[in-house]
Image (tube, rainbow, N blue to C red):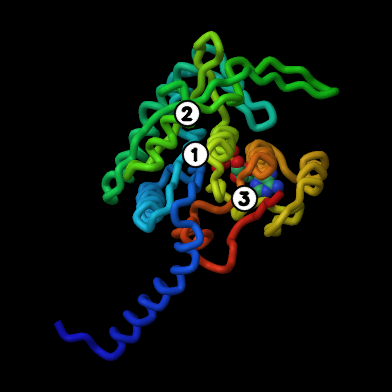
Amino acid sequence: MKISKKDTKDLIKQASILSKALPFMQEYAGKNITIKFGGAVMGEKKLSSSFAKDIVLLKQVGINPIVVHGGGPKIKKMLDKLGVKSDFVDGLRVTDEETMNIVEMVLSGSINKEIVMEINKEGGRGIGMSGKDALLAETKKINITNSLKFKNIGFVGKPHKINTELLNWFLKSNLIPVISPIGFDKNYKTFNINADTMSGCIASSVNSERLILLTDVNGVLDKKGNLLTEISVNEVKKLIKNGTISGGMIPKVQTCLDAVKNGVKAAVILNGKLPHAMLLEMFTESGVGTLITA
Ligand code: ADP
Ligand code: MG
């Protein structure tokens, strides 16, 4: 094969880009990184395989990724198909027993295994589990209470006890944990957990260096739609109160706040539709989404 001058130039450029990632790789080597793969970005085949490639690359260079996934759009599709109505309160799905069965089937059955196989296809070794496996996520029921409303939203919970034994075991191995946001309560009843909330609890439980929430928007946007590159705890509270942050973005920012309060170094919300969003975030100087630090 003959290599032209232009090709050589391109190849040198490629090598130089790789070389620039070295300090970042050294900084993160051996550290845990928790990544939440949002339902909204999961639909496209190409995105899923490029996401898997990035995850496998992280593991290859000695970083320990943990994947937590959502599945909103797929759950909605299945609920519609089966004619089950579903409501949201403050970004959380109201979950009765019938809904719970469908949610678990879609998350732990279909989506979890899809992501595991994408990772396997790229040469990694994905190991799928839910919050039930080895009692990973013991959960407490959530009720929405504020001065204006009280609402029983059914089998929706928040993890309060994470069994890190199994997780740490996987993290030390060549396996990449892929976790579906399903938990159980003290009576071993099944609970639906918002995937953002789950990822935050997992991230804190293993002292993740970073929590990365991949979604379908560039990060937290202000009223005019401009990206807020960094926000503080107080600002977040104000933005929720005045309605700038709403719906699915509420559990996301709350998760970030809790995570940085509970030992995660930094949390980032960014657009998973950007090609190689994770590599941009981890291995370049410029952050791309919204950064939340303690
Ligand atoms: P995911 O599947 O990633 O959890 P969600 O739909 O639950 O996605 O949450 C992301 C959505 O939050 C965005 O698509 C957007 O519609 C909504 N959102 C509400 N307020 C904001 C805001 N201030 N900035 C950005 N997105 C927001
Ligand atoms: Mg969501």
Q: Residues within 10 Å of mark 2 (few under 14, many from 20)?
A: many
The quarter of the rendered structure image containing the N terminus is: bottom left
Residue at point 61% right, 25% down?
160
Task: Indicate whether 37 appears above or below 145.
Answer: below
The answer to whether the beta carbon of the residue marked 1 is less than 8 Å from any atom of ligand 1 is yes
Left or right of 107: which side holds 258?
A: right
Ligand 1: which quarter? top right
Give the x, y percent position of residue 286.
Answer: 58, 67
What is the CA distance from the residue labelled 2 to the residue labelled 1?
Answer: 9 Å
Q: Earlier in the sequence, mark 2 or mark 3?
A: 2
Give the x, y percent position of residue 14.
Answer: 37, 76
Residue of label 2? 75
Quadrant location of residue 134? top left
Q: Which mark is residue 265?
A: 3
- Judged from this view, the residue extending furthest toward the top is 187
- Judged from this view, the residue extending furthest toward the left is 1
Residue of label 1? 39
Which amino acid type corresponds to the residue marked 1 in the rendered image? Answer: Gly
Q: Residues within 10 Å of mark 3 (few under 14, many from 20)?
A: some
Residue at point 65% right, 36% down?
251
- Judged from this view, the residue extending furthest toward the bottom is 5
Q: Is residue 76 visible?
A: no
- Which residue is more in the foreground, 66 or 9? 66
Q: Earlier in the sequence, mark 3 or mark 1?
A: 1
Which amino acid type corresponds to the residue marked 3 in the rendered image? Answer: Lys
